[in-house]
Image (cartoon, helix red, strand yellow):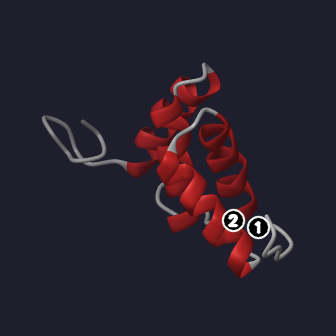
Amino acid sequence: MYENGQGVRQDDAEVVKWFRKAAEQGLVEAQYNLGVMYAEGRGVRRDDAEAVKWFRQAAAQGLAQAQFNLGVLYENGQGVRRDDAE
């Protein structure tokens, strides 16, 4: 709702708050989406290391898009030391 402004004013900071609550409880989609918010600086200050943290958790649960995004961050050395093998 807050992400798209459905019935409420669009509010990325509120989106991050709710994604975090769900992500901390292990919801893979929330972990991935929280990684996206940090990678793009939406609702939070851009933080590649924090994006890596959340993509890694989602990737560990088998979410292919998180695995891909994590690979891109390793390839570019964003939030982690560049590691082509990783």
* Residue placed most toward the observer, 74 or 21: 74
For image coordinates 67% across by 37% down, the residue present is 60
Q: Secondary structure at mark 2?
A: helix
Q: Earlier in the sequence, mark 1 or mark 2?
A: 2
Q: How many marks?
A: 2
The disc at residue 45 is none
Neighbor class of circle 1 (other Cα within 10 Å; few <14, some 14-19, many 20+) is some
What whole-number distance in Å separates the C-alpha atoms at marks 1 and 2?
4 Å
* Residue placed most toward the observer, 32 or 13: 32
For image coordinates 86% across by 72% down, the residue present is 81
The picture places residue 70, in percent across and down from the top left corner, at 64, 59
Which residue is at the far left?
Answer: 7
The picture places residue 76, in percent across and down from the top left corner, at 70, 80
The picture places residue 23, in percent across and down from the top left corner, at 57, 30
What's the residue type where badge 1 is placed?
A: Gly
What's the residue type where badge 2 is placed?
A: Asp
Residue on which disc 2 sits:
48
**Left or right of residue 35, residue 10 in this image:** left
Residue on which disc 1 sits:
79
Quadrant in the picture for the C terminus: bottom right
Q: Is residue 75 above or below residue 6?
A: below
Which residue is at the far bottom?
Answer: 76
Based on the displayed image, in which of its 4 quarters is residue 77 positioned? bottom right
Neighbor class of circle 2 (other Cα within 10 Å; few <14, some 14-19, many 20+) is many
Which residue is at the far right?
Answer: 81
**Contact check, label 1 and label 2, Cβ < 8 Å:** yes
